[in-house]
Image (cartoon, rainbow, N blue to C red):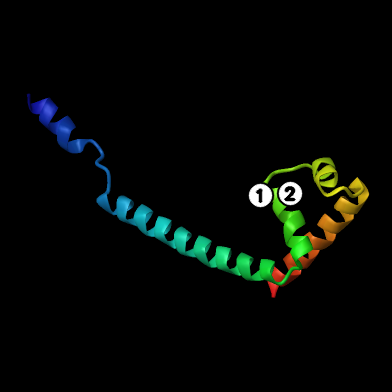
Amino acid sequence: MRNEAFRHYSRPRPDPTDEVDKFESEGEEQVVATVDRADLQAALERLSERERSLLSLRYEEDLTQPAIAARLGIPEGTVKAQLHRARLKLRRAYAS
């Protein structure tokens, strides 16, 4: 009985502050995600409708470049070039 009591009190116990730290860090991540989302939305608004449309087809609808070309009725090379330019413009707008 005595040994069981020693084992019970000597085993490591979880630190309750770990849960508080975890909760606080999750809250910070949500704030950062919200700020990032707002910045991204502002950057997207600086793009033309065509650029936003291409990025939406590629990343929201998850279409491949050939599928985008078929949907829009334009050559695949045009899609590649326009997506490339749209991403560059988005990066610049997001950075500023």
Q: What residue lies at 74% left-to-right and 68% top-to-bottom?
A: 47
> Residue 38, image x and y in percent?
56, 68
**Residue sitting at the far bottom:** 96
> The C terminus appears in which quarter of the rendering?
bottom right
Q: What residue lies at 80% left-to-right and 41% top-to-bottom?
A: 67
As rendered, which of 3 and 77 lies closer to the eye?
Answer: 77
> The N terminus appears in which quarter of the rendering?
top left
Q: Which mark is residue 60?
A: 1
Q: Which residue is mark 2?
A: 58
Q: Is residue 76 left or right of residue 55?
A: right
Q: Which mark is residue 24?
A: none
Q: What amino acid is at disc 2?
A: Arg
> Residue 77, image x and y in percent?
92, 49
> Residue 28, image x and y in percent?
44, 62
Secondary element type, mark 2: helix
Classify residue 45 by image quadrant: bottom right
- Evaluate if marks 1 and 2 touch, with contact meaning CB atoms under 8 Å apart: yes
Q: Is residue 7 left or right of residue 92?
A: left
Q: What residue lies at 14% left-to-right and 32% top-to-bottom?
A: 6
Q: Would you place residue 95 above or below residue 61 in this image?
A: below
Classify residue 84 by image quadrant: bottom right
Mark 1, other Cα within 10 Å: few <14 / some 14–19 / many ≥20: few
The answer for how far apart the CA atoms under marks 1 and 2 are is: 6 Å
Mark 2, other Cα within 10 Å: few <14 / some 14–19 / many ≥20: some
> Residue 20, image x and y in percent?
31, 55
As rendered, which of 16 and 36 lies closer to the eye?
Answer: 36
Q: What residue lies at 35% left-to-right and 55% top-to-bottom?
A: 23
Secondary element type, mark 1: helix
**Residue sitting at the far left:** 1
